[in-house]
Amino acid sequence: MQKENQPYNIQPADRLASVSEYYFSRKLKEVAKMNAEGKDVISLGIGSPDLPPSPETIDVLCENARKPDAHGYQPTVGIPELRKAMADWYKRWYDVDLDPATEIQPLIGSKEGILHVTLALVNPGDQVLVPNPGYPTYTSLNKILGSEIVNYNLREDNHWQPDFEELERMDLSRVKIMWTNYPNMPTGANATMELYERLVDFARRHSIVIVNDNPYSFILNRKPISILNVPGAKECCIEFNSMSKSHNMPGWRVGLLATNATFVQWILKIKSNIDSGTFRPMQLAAAQAYHNSAEWHEEANYEVYSRRRRLAEEIMTTLGCTFDPEQVGMFLWGRIPDSYADVEELTEKVLHEARVFITPGFIFGSNGKRYIRISLCAKEDKLAEALNRIKKIMD
């Protein structure tokens, strides 16, 4: 029997010491508190599309969710209809041939893919190459799993591409994975076939697996490409893709990875021990979404974001920031004026004086410490209001 007042002392796992709460989770609590106080903060932080999927997608979901036999467990590999739709989509838009039965694995979003790929390929103590700046989850999940993080530089003067000469001078003997993300988040740098060819060559010569995260290739970009367009890439590359951005389905958590059949089987060993397949009506609806027309993509992924982008550029200019007008994707990345001691001096001023939340670039790595990122996932009236508020505090 437990004695009264005996202390009960449980400590968290040691791995929690290596990571902190996700920046947006922490900062959005502050924004929510400000909103509760009636301050009406306009958030230009998160890249969560605010528009709906195509009507046909919703119709298929609702129709199938009403069926009494639609609610059972689903196979971890995904239903054949979804895998075929994913393969057809890759052929239609990227001209990449994939075997839907063996070379595609549906995912519950790319975050899950980062976890499963690392568990399948990387032993504790192995090294992984992570871009700086880059998506914070590449770092946090690999820290949790015991990988040794080795950052590689992306710099504005090199168009936010890897410095291959710098990479070749590094000791790569323990590197298993190189994480890449093009079109790039947060910088908006677009992919090129030359870049993908260099990455594939680099991977093959050093026996490294390139994992290319490719969810932004449709946003403000009429010529999407895949690293799998490069001959031989399937042998040494894994590509993630997601419906969150290109199909306005962030909350659905439907994505994919595409690679060779051997890698898929290794990853499936991990995934099948962690979860079962996604709700069948959602898979059928996702399969329908992959058939969205070119006209739907033109309006949803180009026209809408073009209008918003013009307002975001005005905000950048008002703040005195400089930016590359050739950026693609659903963010605008800009360098802050030298007059600010650091980026938080600017973002905190904008948050507390203009009540507009903008992301400071340091959360993506040290190479982002003089930059800000504006999300285009806000309607034009909100962006216009944010611009007006910022103009008032900058006068």
Image: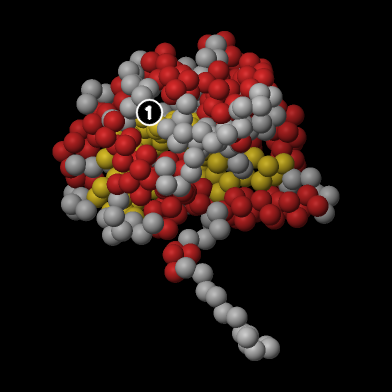
- Taking the image as shown, residue 336 lies to the left or right of residue 315, namely left
Using the image as rendered, state which of residue 191 and residue 126 is in the foreground. 126
Query: How many numbered marks have been drawn onto this rendered protein structure?
Result: 1
Q: Position of residue 266 (x, y in %)?
A: 31, 41
Image quadrant where residue 5 sits: bottom right
- Taking the image as shown, residue 97 lies to the left or right of residue 82, namely left
Tell me which residue sits at (70%, 27%) in the image.
380
Q: Disc 1 marks which amino acid?
A: Ile
Q: What element does badge 1 sit on? A: strand
Image quadrant where residue 53 sits: top right
Tell me which residue sits at (52%, 61%) in the image.
20
Determine if residue 316 is in view.
no
Most distant residue in the right direction = 38
Q: Position of residue 305 (x, y in %)?
A: 60, 24
Quarter of the image where the C terminus is located: top right
Reading the image, the residue beneath label 1 is 104
Quarter of the image where the N terminus is located: bottom right
Tell me which residue sits at (29%, 47%) in the image.
121
Q: Residues within 10 Å of mark 1 (few under 14, many from 20)?
A: many
Determine if residue 357 is in view.
yes
Q: Position of residue 50 (x, y in %)?
A: 66, 31
